[in-house]
Amino acid sequence: MTGIERLYSALVEYLRSDVILKDLLSDIYEQAPTNASLPYVYLHFRYIEEICTFDRLAYRAMIMCCSLSNSLEEVMNITEQVRSVCMAFFSDKEKYVLSYIRYRIAHLSQNVFQSNIDLEVLISDSSELPRE
């Protein structure tokens, strides 16, 4: 498993384990707080770029996290919680460095709002580059 795969699975699990986020999402979709709520927050790697260092391989990844809601207040609360959870996740990681985080909320139609959180992460892969 590469550093990118480890990051994706760890971040998804971290989002799933957040009780406040589960409660916010379950309120919107009127269901009991479960891990099933989390598909309403969509996590996607937009691009991944390899960075060669002296003896190791590193990556720069753009991660996008989206959510939808019919209420501006709800989508703002979800966005703030997802941002807080992501910042907490990256604060104590050695192999992942959060280089920036940015978010915006779009009004898609009459009653639909979408939040986008963009994260740029530097990932240190533990596998060494092959010697030539």
Image: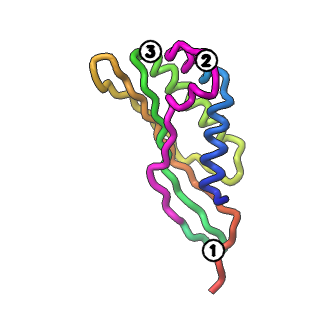
Labels 1 & 3 near each other (Cβ < 8 A): no
The answer to which quarter of the image holds residue 27 is top right
User: In front here: 93 or 2?
Assistant: 2
**Residue 45 percent across, percent down from the top left:** 49, 49
Q: Label 1: state its secondary structure.
A: loop
Is 44 covered by the magenta stretch?
Answer: yes
Q: Amino acid at mark 3?
A: Glu
Residue in the image at 64% along x and 23% along y: 34
- Residue 73 got which mark? 3
Of pointers 1 and 2, the one earlier in the residue sequence: 2
Q: Secondary structure at mark 2?
A: helix
The residue tagged 1 is 54
Q: Amino acid at mark 2?
A: Asp
Which tag is nearer the camera, tag 1 or tag 2?
2
**Mark 3 vs mark 2: which is more N-terminal?**
2
Q: Nearer the viewer, residue 49 or 108?
A: 108
Q: Is residue 96 left or right of residue 100?
A: right
Q: Identify the magenta region.
A: 23-50
Q: Is residue 43 above or below residue 114?
A: below
Dots 3 and 2: beta carbons under 8 Å? no
The type of residue carrying mark 1 is Phe
Which mark, residue 79?
A: none
Count of residue discs = 3
The image quadrant that residue 71 belongs to is: top left
At 68% from the left and 54% from the top, the residue drawn is 95
Residue denoted by label 2 = 23
